[in-house]
Amino acid sequence: KTPVSNKNLIKCSDDETKIIEPIELQIELDKLVDKYQNGRCFIRPSGTENVVRIYAEAYSQILADELANKAIDLIDRYIV
């Protein structure tokens, strides 16, 4: 998870697997995930804290951690 100034700037689909606002964040996340073998990454605002939760999977734990850290970089770019 990563703290943000306003978690309400991120809106997700009902199943929380896609970001619908800001759509640019989802587009960049999709591009990032495509670079990882067996990559998946979901971002959603916490229901109780002013944080965004990041779920990342990849071929190895090292790659999953790298994917999660790069996802945090994207969040920092789009959620100010």
Image: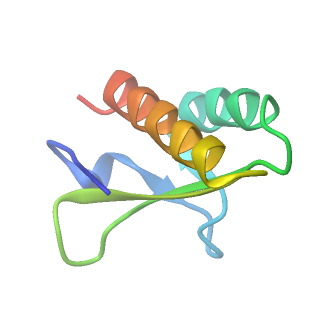
Give the mark count.
0
- Which picture quadrant has residue 5? top left
Q: Which of 56 and 10 is in front in this view?
A: 56
Nearer the observer, 64 or 70: 64
Q: Where is residue 34 in the image (x, y as percent from the top left)?
A: 82, 33
Q: Relative to residue 34, is residue 56 drawn left or right?
A: left
Q: Quadrant of the N terminus?
A: bottom left
Q: Where is residue 52 in the image (x, y as percent from the top left)?
A: 33, 56
Camera-side residue: 55 or 23? 55
- Above or below — where is 67 with respect to 6? above
Taking depth in this image into account, of 29 and 12 the one nearest to the observer is: 29
* Left or right: 53, with 50 as reference point: right
Which residue is at a point 65% across and 75% down the rendered structure image?
Answer: 15
Q: Which residue lies furthest to the top in this view?
A: 77
- Seen at 85% across and 51% down, the residue is 38
Name the residue rendered at 54%, 37% in the picture.
66
In the shown orientation, is residue 51 left or right of residue 54?
left
Name the image colouring: rainbow
| Quadrant in which the C terminus is drawn | top left
Specify whether 27 is left or right of 6: right
Which residue is found at the position 74% from the left and 27% from the top? 31
- Which of the 4 image quarters holds residue 30? top right
